Image (cartoon, rainbow, N blue to C red):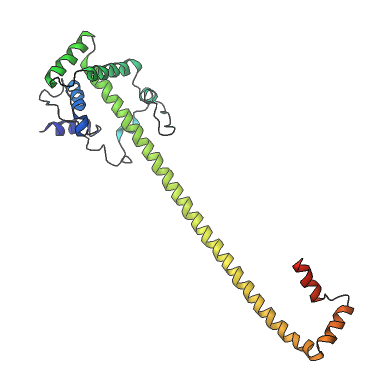
């Protein structure tokens, strides 16, 4: 079994696979955290079978929260609050933070075996059980994984609901456009049939002549002079 496969089977793919630039830091963390788990660890980067996968896939890590974690406003995460919501107490978080600082403070050129000895010796001097650090570290990773997956699930729900609403609006818009088009077509038909009828009636007026019609229009209180209407429209 390779180290990557060992990590994958141990942590169920919660870890992030590091690129070459970050490999050395990843090795230090892996070596310090697995000293009592896998004695044959050589310090390869941490495997992450699901790190780049579909975060909408349900996972047991989504149920680690004892209280609702805070929302990520603007994509910013309050990690301390997330860990606290998952039941990782302040002492456990401090242990992990101090271990991270210790690992980062080691000289870059130091061999991994030496780094491991330094870290283990320092932790023992502080009276911090390595098992407790490993446990708290995995708790934090579980919390982060669950936090991301819960957020992804909420986001997926929002997208589905929004997509359904958009489709409803699209149907409504289509129906409104159909009503508009029908109204335009009906109005065009009204204009045509009314103009046809006007031409039919106009034959009577043409029979009596323009001057006679104009005289009757001016004398009748019921009729409107078309020339007055034209002036009113122009003004």
Instruction: Look at 83% across and 84% down and name the residue there.
Output: 213
Nearer to us in this view, 20 or 94: 20
In which quadrant of the rendered view does residue 37 lie? top left
Instruction: Look at 13% across and 21% down and name the residue there.
Output: 112
| Image side of residue 177 versus residue 55, left or right | right
Instruction: Look at 21% across and 34% down and name the residue there.
Output: 19
Residue 168 in the image, given as x and y percentages of width and height: 49, 55
| Image side of residue 194 versus residue 52, left or right | right
- Image height check: is 102 above or below 19? above
- Image height check: is 100 above or below 195? above
| Image side of residue 19 versus residue 196, left or right | left
Nearer to us in this view, 43 or 84: 43
Nearer to us in this view, 223 or 2: 223
| Image side of residue 47 versus residue 136, left or right | left
Residue 108 in the image, given as x and y percentages of width and height: 18, 21
Residue 127 in the image, given as x and y percentages of width and height: 23, 9
In which quadrant of the rendered view does residue 63 lie? top left
In which quadrant of the rendered view does residue 67 lie? top left
Nearer to us in this view, 1 or 79: 79
Q: Quadrant of the C terminus?
A: bottom right
Instruction: Look at 32% across and 19% down and name the residue there.
Output: 93
Q: Quadrant of the N terminus?
A: top left
Residue 80 in the image, given as x and y percentages of width and height: 37, 22
Q: How many marks?
A: 0
């Amino acid at each position: 079994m390779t180290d990557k496969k060992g990590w994958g089977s141990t942590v169920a793919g919660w870890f992030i696979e590091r690129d070459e630039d970050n490999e050395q830091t990843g090795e230090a963390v892996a070596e310090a955290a697995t000293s009592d788990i896998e004695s044959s660890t050589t310090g390869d980067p941490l495997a992450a079978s699901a790190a780049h996968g579909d975060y909408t896939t349900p996972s047991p890590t989504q149920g680690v929260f004892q209280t609702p974690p805070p929302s990520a406003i603007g994509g910013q995460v309050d990690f301390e609050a997330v860990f606290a919501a998952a039941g990782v107490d302040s002492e456990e978080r401090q242990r992990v933070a101090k271990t991270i600082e210790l690992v980062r403070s080691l000289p870059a050129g130091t061999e991994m075996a030496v780094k491991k000895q330094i870290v283990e010796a320092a932790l023992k001097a502080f009276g911090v059980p390595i098992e407790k650090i490993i446990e708290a570290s995995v708790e934090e990773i579980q919390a982060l994984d669950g936090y991301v997956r819960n957020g992804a699930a909420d986001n997926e729900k929002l997208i589905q609901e929004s997509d359904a609403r958009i489709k409803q609006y699209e149907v409504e818009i289509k129906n409104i456009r159909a009503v508009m088009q029908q109204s335009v077509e009906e109005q065009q038909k009204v204009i045509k049939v009314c103009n046809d009828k006007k031409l039919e009636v106009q034959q009577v007026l043409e029979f009596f002549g323009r001057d006679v019609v104009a005289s009757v229009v001016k004398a009748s209180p019921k009729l409107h002079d078309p020339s007055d209407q034209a002036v009113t429209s122009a003004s």
